[in-house]
Amino acid sequence: MPSPIVSIIAPVYGVERYLETCINSVLNQTYPHFELLLVDDRSPDNSPAICDRYAAIDDRIRVIHKPENQGLGFARNTGLENVTGEYVLFIDSDDYIESNLLEKALAAFEENTQFVVFGFNRVHQDEQGEVTHVEKLSPETAAATTPRDTADVFAMLNRAKVFPFAWNKLYKRSFLEQCGTLFEKTKLIEDFLFNIDLFAKASFINTIPDNLYNYRKPAHETLVSAYAPEFFDLCKRKYSLERAYLQTVEAETPEYCQLLYFSYVKHLVSVFLKNRSPKAALSAKQQRQKIREVLNDEMTKEVLTQYQPQGLVMKLVSFLFKKKMVALSYWMVAVGAKYI
């Protein structure tokens, strides 16, 4: 019986500095039965030529040159339209994977498993690209065998801070096709939107603690550096989808609801931080007005009413938000966000 093929989808855009490391990490896999789809999203640098060079020397590599740039999510969708393997793995082309990723992840599949989740290393870099430290994030070993079980896995993955990403999971292609789930053209939470839909449709999930993926975190990538005026709406949508998922699998327990409330409140801090970005071009007065609007939002008020914070910092944050102390909230975000 032939070994199953894993289809690896790597969107490519503006990554010539890292692309060869990424591709080589795939070629060095201990499990050799894969196809690597390099989806050139109309990259403006030398990345397309690098892709073509590798495809010429290894017939497991295919390059798809898109006629126009459409973003990460749509590039992944293009890859999904062209896969031939039994399994699907996503990799961002400025990251790299451990040599035993495919071997380890495939070994975790059982007869009915729909996807496997594994850990990753968050590789922090300074402005020169040198590694400053590596943060290891790992799930526990677990298995879901019913829709209700997936909620326990969902909660565990959230506590471990490894839930939303598309690249720390190996998916069975037939499950993806059965679900019909695709990536949306949105920034910031496209991976979450993809995975929450799959969790709502899944019954069989396995998780392993192995750190098999390396995610680069450059120094310039911070919450403050990225501004997205739609971020608060995305946060509300995220919360609504999580709540609907728990309802669907009949797991809307007080414990799991508190997990969602905690996440929502932390996202409010992220909203305020993003408003402080130089790219936002908001005055202090405008930032305080944004805080006021968010704290007066009906969903925010509902969450703050039910949230029972643990720990001194989150109790303080929750108190300031609940009492709508705009000026103190503005100060807290400016000074104390690193402690949240």
Image (tube, rainbow, N blue to C red):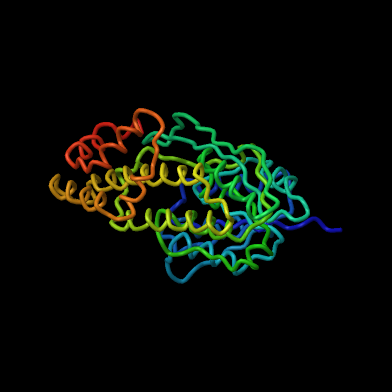
278 sits left or right of 264 in the view: left
Name the quadrant of the N terminus.
bottom right
Q: Nearer the viewer, residue 127 or 307?
A: 307
Identify the residue at horizontal 49%, vertical 44% (top origin).
254
203 sits left or right of 257 in the view: right
Q: Position of residue 173 (x, y in %)?
A: 67, 62
Identify the residue at horizontal 34%, vertical 58% (top origin).
233
Q: Position of residue 265 (x, y in %)?
A: 36, 43
Q: Position of residue 93 (x, y in %)?
A: 52, 51
Q: How many marks?
A: 0
Say if 178 sits above or below 306 in the image.
below
Name the quadrant of the C terminus.
top left
Report the residue that reaches farthest toward the bottom: 67
Identify the residue at horizontal 50%, vertical 32% (top origin).
135
Q: Position of residue 160 (x, y in %)?
A: 53, 38
Say if 4 sits above or below 133 in the image.
below
The answer to whether residue 31 of the structure is visible from this angle is yes
Q: Nearer the viewer, residue 58 or 276?
A: 276
Q: Nearer the viewer, residue 223 or 196?
A: 196
The answer to whether residue 56 of the structure is visible from this angle is no
